[in-house]
Image (tube, helix red, strand yellow):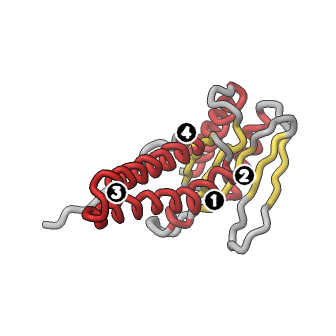
Amino acid sequence: MAEVATEVRMAPSWMYVNELRLVTVVLGAAIVVLGIGLLVFLVDGPEQMDTVDVFLGTGVFFILFTVFLFVPRLRSRGAISFTLLVEHSMDEVEIAVTEALQASGRVAHVEVQKSRFQRPPREVVIDGLTWRFSLRAAPYRESRAEGTPWTEIVQTGLQKEEDEVARDLRERVLSRLATSDSVQS
């Protein structure tokens, strides 16, 4: 008898990402691997050329991987960011984020970014604060579901992880989304 696979859903929560640390770790690993390859070449000479090629190739791969993947992400999100992935349309998320900001006494406006995508990303800019919320469609998540829209919320431009105002607004956004989720169910 075939068992039906059930998907376990966890409550959404904010995920902390330190982009600068990721870049530093991968580049550090690349330097270590390149150093080992150079050391093997200096110690054993041309007899171990296959081993040296593997180390040098891996080190160059790490460097290119960092330059093409992590550096653009660091540029777009900043050194520190928080990410939340929710099963709501971008319009619902935009309303929840702006309501949460208004409830905290902040003034915010939404800027729709130019994009070739069907659902362009949106930036929620908060007056008086350097950081913002970016709303992006998550089609990689939608392809696994039954066509329900998923949105990724990214809090970008933070200077430090312990920003109390930023943490408070993240909690307000999460509670607002949880409230809208219980109303829809």
Name the residue tied to disc 4.
Answer: 16
Residue occupying image coordinates x 63% and y 33%: 171
Q: Nearer the viewer, mark 4 or mark 3?
A: 3
Left or right: residue 58 versus residue 122 is left
* Residue 23 is at least partly visible in this image: yes
Q: Residue at 62% across / 46% down in the picture?
A: 180
Element type at mark 3:
helix
Residue beneath the point at 25% across and 64% down: 47
Residue type beneath disc 1: Ser
- Res. 118 image quadrant: bottom right
Mark carried by residue 89: 1
Distance of label 1 from label 4 (alpha carbons): 23 Å
Cα distance, mark 4 to mark 3? 40 Å
As shown in the figure, which amino acid type bears the numbered disc 2? Glu
Q: Earlier in the sequence, mark 1 or mark 3?
A: 3
Q: Which image quarter holds the N terminus?
A: bottom left
Sequence-earlier tag: 4 or 3: 4
Instruction: State how far apart marks 2 and 4 are (Cα).
Output: 21 Å
Residue mark closest to the camera, 1 vs 4: 4
Badge 1, how many Cα within 10 Å: few under 14, some, many 20+?
Answer: some
* Residue bearing mark 2: 94
Counting residues from the start of the chain, the first of labels 3 and 2 encountered is 3
* Residue 82, position as x, y percentages in the image: 60, 41
**Dot 3 amino acid type:** Phe
Please, is residue 144 above or below residue 163 in the view? below
